[in-house]
Structures are given as structure tokens and as C-alpha cells.
Amino acid sequence: MPTWRDWESRWNQQQTGYRPYKAMSLEVMMDLIAQKVPNTGGRVLDLAAGLGTITGQMIHRWPQIAIVAVDLDPVLLQIGQGLYAQYPQVEWMSADLRDSHWHRGLTPGFDAVVTASALHWLDLKTLSRLYQDIFHLLKPGGYFLNSDHMRIDAGPLLLESVDAARKIKMRASRPSGYEDWDQWWNAVSTDPRLGPLMAERSRRFGSTMDADIEASSGWHLGVLRSHGFHDAAVVWQWFHEALIMGVR
């Protein structure tokens, strides 16, 4: 039977096929968090944390850090909890970001709120409200970092060229025998610990399961500023993949 680390490794390989430079964007994210989180540890909220990709990197860099890892997916939560069961400073929380009360029970004052490869499945109205929630959960001067699909602000002809180039690079980065999104989930369904959770996963996500709303980076930055972030910018970008940062 695959271990939790086996599923994590296969997940990371699968993700690379869609975002070849995701690891680089997360490296930049860690370096930026280091400017805010004290060496003795800080308090970070990992939104749509999945199986804990960002959480794991933070724990290994700042062993004393306190993390609240939030996700809705019961399968990914199960894997994440298995991976980091020995770290009591990580609190796992099941919550639906589409629910305006998702943050009930969370105490504001986080040094940073982080997320990656996830918020593109939220509709823009919900995402705007979520950004407002994040503002209020951060302490003054706190950082918000989001690495995700974000369309370049450009006209249709330039966008067409950029998208074509990105797709070529994505295909070239996929090794022989690459396991895609559907194949990974099909494999997960055969694991006796995870398979029984698949029906609940479908129930929770419903019609948003395969959503992919690729708003422009300019849209994201404008919404952050409108909700009170006094500074917001793209701090890393690869074609339509960007890391944005807002400072409360």
C-alpha cells in the first residue's frame, strides 16, 4: 500500500505537469515570508492547503512556526494529517471557502496568509469576499501571498501567443509515463484508506469540482487594494502563472 509520502511525491509530480515552475514560485514565497515571520516562529494561515505542500516547507524552515491549514477536500486533508501527524503546531481545519462564515473559530492576527494553485476554482464574487476576509485575519503589516493561475494583462493577440508558448513548455516538461490529474485521483480511489472518502469529496465540491477561473493579475491586485491592502504587486511570474503579494 502506498505511504503518505508516496502520495505526496506523486501529487508533486502531477502538479509539475500543469505548473512547471510552481516549486520556484513557492521558493520565492518562502523567502518573502522570511521577512515577516520571526526566527522563533510566527503564526501562518495556509488556505486551501491541500495535502500540505506549503505547510511542509514552512515547518522545515521554521520548526517553531504555528500553522492553521484549511481545506475542504477530505482526501487531501487525510493525506496531510498523515504526513504531518508528528507536528502538534499544525492545526488542520475543514472549511468551505465559499461559505461566508468559513473563518468562524479563527482568531485574527496572523503574520501571513498563504495559498497556492487553489483559488482559481472560486467565482470572482466569492474570491473578492475571501480577500476581504483575509485582510481582517492578518495583523497590521501582515503578508498575503497567492501563487496561482493568473492571466497576463494584455490584448487578445499577445495573450494567444503567450498561451501557445506556455502550452508548448508544459507539454515538454512532462516526462514519459506522466500521471495527470485524473489518473492521480483514479489511483487514489483504489487506496482503502482514501477511496471511501471520494463520495464525500464529490458531495462537498459539487459543480465547482472542475472550475478554472483565470482572472488577470491586475484584477487580483485591484481587489486587494480595494479591500484595504496598502500595497499589492506581482512578485514572480511565468506566463499565466503568478505569485502576488499584498501587505495589510
Image (spheres, rainbow, N blue to C red):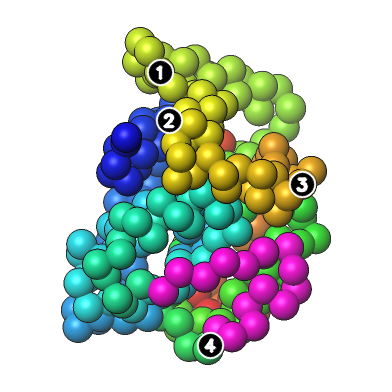
* Sequence order check, earlier mark of 4 and 3: 4
Query: Tag 3, which secondary structure?
Result: helix
Residue mark closest to the camera, 1 vs 3: 3
- Residue 108 marker: 4
- Contact, mark 4 vs mark 2 (Cβ under 8 Å): no
Query: Tag 1, which secondary structure?
Result: loop
Q: Which residues are magenta?
A: 91-106
Q: Main secondary structure of the magenta part?
A: loop
- Contact, mark 1 vs mark 2 (Cβ under 8 Å): yes
Q: Residues within 10 Å of mark 3 (few under 14, many from 20)?
A: few
- Contact, mark 1 vs mark 3 (Cβ under 8 Å): no
Residue mark closest to the camera, 2 vs 3: 3
Task: Give the labeled residue for mark 3.
Answer: 206
Q: CA distance from mark 4 to mark 3?
A: 30 Å
Q: Residues within 10 Å of mark 2 (few under 14, many from 20)?
A: many
130 or 64, which lies in front? 64
Task: Give the labeled residue for mark 2.
Answer: 14
Tell me the amino acid under the disc marked 1: Tyr
* Sequence order check, earlier mark of 4 and 1: 4
Q: CA distance from mark 4 to mark 2?
A: 34 Å
* Sequence order check, earlier mark of 4 and 2: 2
Tell me the amino acid under the disc marked 2: Gln
Query: Tag 2, which secondary structure?
Result: helix
* Sequence order check, earlier mark of 1 and 2: 2
Task: Give the labeled residue for mark 1.
Answer: 178
Which residue is found at the position 22% from the left and 78% from the top?
64
Seen in the picture, residue 110 relative to 242 is either above or below; the reply is below
